[in-house]
Image (cartoon, helix red, strand yellow):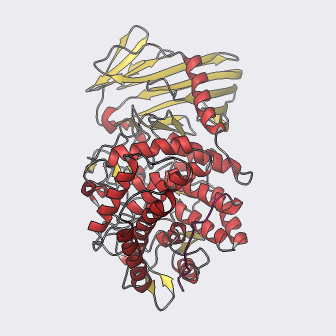
Amino acid sequence: MRRTWQPGRVTTPIDDYALLADLHSAALVSRGGSIDWMCLPRFDSAAVFTSLLGTPEHGRWLIAPEGGTVIDRQYEDGTFVLRTRWRTPTGEAEVTEFMPAGDGRADLVREVTCVAGTVEIRSELILRLDYGATIPWAHRVGDALTAIAGPDQYVLRGPSLEAGDKRHVGRHELGAGETATWVLTWSNSWADLPVPLDIVGALDDTRRIWRTWDDAVVVDRRWADAVRRSLLVLRALTHADTGGIVAAPTTSLPEDPGGERNWDYRYCWLRDSALTLESLLAHGGADAAANWRDWLLRAIAGDPDDLQIMYGVGGERSLAEHTLDHLPGYLDSAPVRVGNGAVKQYQADVVGEVMIALAKLREAGVHEDDFSWPLQRAMLTYTIARMDEKDQGLWEMRGEPHYFTHSRVMMWAAFDRGVRAIDGHGLDGAREEWARFRDQLRAEILEHGVDPSTGAFRQTSGQSEVDASLLQIAQSGFVAYDDPLMLSTVEKIEHDLLRDGLVLRYRTASGKDGLAGSEHPFVACSFWLVEQYAMSGREADATALMDRLVGFTNDLGLLAEEYDASTNAQIGNFPQAFSHLALVRAADALTGRYQAPVTSTRSR
C-alpha cells in the first residue's frame, strides 16, 4: 500500500517520482505530472522547481490531462526517456518527457499526444528561481516566454500559456493523433536567446547516448532488470564533462520525517564514488571508471593535508552548509540545507576505500601514470600523519570523534593496497613503512576493535555497540566473510540493528551522532547483509532478502536512501547512488560475478 503523507498538507510520496537526467543535472516528475524538483544547469545549481521541499508556490511545472488517471509509465529501454499513459473519461494520452543529453544545452522536453478520443491538457508553470525564493521577470520575445532573474534565464517554447497570479496556465484540447510539445531551456541571462531545440534530433541523440552506454553493460540473468537500471542510475548521477558522481540529485529529503536529519547529497563523496567505480568495473564500465579516476586526481590534487571527504561536481572544495529558512521542508522537515558541513570532517576510512577502488582499476588493466601513483603515495603519507587521530566515521557523526573500527580497518586496507601495488605491479614506494603500519593496525583492531564478550567487531573501541559499517570489513579483505569474527558480528547486528528485517545503520539512542530523533533502515546496509550472507554460505537467506529489497524499488526501478517497512514508503534523498551500487554488489555476490578479496590469514 502507498501512504499519502499529510503533515499539515499533502506531500507526494518519494517513490511516486521519476528521474529525468541529461548527464549534467536532473529533475523529478511525479506520477501526477508535476515536476517538483529541477536544478539547471548542474546537479548542484539552485533549483527552479522546489515544491518538493515546500508548496507549489516554491516552483513547479504541471502538465496533466484533465480528469486523467495514470494507467502505465515506464522508461524506454536503456534510457531515461519517460513515457506515461493517461486515461480520461473522453480519451487517452501519452506523455513523453526527457532531458536531452550530449548537446551541451540544458533543456527539458514535455510532449503530449492524444492516442484516442479527445483530451484536455492542463498546464501550470510556476517559475521560482534560487530555490523558490525569487520570482523572475517574465515577458514574451516572439514565440518564446522568457523569465529572468540574476544570472539565470529560462525560455519556454510551445503552445501559449496565459499569465496571471505570478504563474502561467493553459488548457489545450487535443484530438486523436494531435500533439502538443513544450521545451523549457536554461541559459545565462546575459546570453542571446537560445535557438529552438531540434526535438526529433535531440530525442534520437538522447536515446543513442543512453543505449550506447547501456549496451556495453554486462549483467547476469538473475535480477537483471534491477541491476541494469541501477547501473543506469549510477551513470545518470555522473557528470559527463567532469566525471564526478553525485550521491543523489536532491537535498534535504529527510531520514527522519519531521526531524532535522536532512542533508544535501548533490556532491561527490570520495567513498561513494570509489564504490561506484567498483560496481562499474564489474560490469564492463572501465571507461566510466577511468573518467572517475581522472576526476579524483584533479579534485584531490594539491597538498595531501588538504584532502577532503567530498567535493563539488567539478572538484570544488568550498561546500559551506547553510539553511533555506523560507522553505518548510518535505514533510515539514526543517531545516532545508544547501551545502554540507561534513566536508570539514576527518573520516579516516576514505583513503582506504579510494585505494581499494584504484587497486581494482589497476587489476582491470588501467595503468598508473606519473600523476595517479604519486597521488596515492601522498594519500598514504596523509594517513600516516593522522594515525592516532579519532574521526567521525563512515556515517558522518556530528557528535564527538571516536576510534571507529570500520575506519581503522579501512586505514589497514589503504596500506595493504599500497604494499600490494609494489609487490604485484612493480610500483615504487615506502613498502616496509607501509607494511609496518598495516601490521600495527591489524594488531590494534584485533585487540581493541573486538568485543571480548561476544567475539564480534564493535563500532568503536571500549564499548559493545555495533553498526552496519562493520559489514564492510570482509569486503576490505581484512578477514574472510566466513571468519568467526564476521559471523559473530553478523549475529550481533541481526540482534541489535534489524527493524522489520532490515538493517539500521546504528542505534541512534547511543547518542554518538549528536542529532535528535531517529531514522529508518538504510537500504544499502541491508544489501551489504545480502552480500555477507551470500559469501558466507547462507544463500537461501541472501536470496530471500535480495528479493525483498529489490521489491522496494518503485515502478521505474528507483531506490531512495532508506525504507520504512511499516508504511511501505521510501525515505530520504532520491534516487540514492549508495542504494543502487549496493544492489549491484549484492546481485554480483549471489550470481558469482563478485570476487572476494584475498585474505592472507584468518583472524584466529
- Image check: 446 left or right of 324? right
- Image check: 543 left or right of 139? right
Kindly indicate the quadrant of the structure image that contains residue 536.
bottom right
Q: Is residue 338 visible?
A: no
- Pick the residue in front: 4 or 184: 184
Residue 538, image x, y percentages: 69, 74
Task: Name the outermost residue toward the top.
Answer: 142
- Pick the residue in front: 398 or 418: 418
Residue 257, image x, y percentages: 43, 59
Q: Is residue 240 visible?
A: yes
Kindly indicate the quadrant of the structure image that contains residue 49.
top left
| Point 63% across, 60% down: residue | 594
Quarter of the figure that contains the N terminus: bottom right
| Point 50% across, 31% down: residue | 62
| Point 30% across, 62% down: residue | 381
Task: Name the outermost residue toward the bottom.
Answer: 453
Main SS class of the magenta portion in the image: loop
- In this rendering, the answer to whether 387 lies above or below 175 is below
Kindly indicate the quadrant of the structure image that contains residue 38.
top left
| Point 61% across, 49% down: residue | 554
- Pick the residue in front: 374 or 98: 374
Quarter of the figure that contains the C terminus: bottom right
- Pick the residue in front: 592 or 150: 592
Residue 138 within the magenta-colored segment of the rendering: no
- In this rendering, the answer to whether 390 lies above or below 275 is below
Residue 522, image x, y percentages: 50, 63
Residue 362, image x, y percentages: 51, 52
**Span highlighted in magenta in the image:** 593-604
Numbered label tally: 0
- Image check: 472 left or right of 269? right
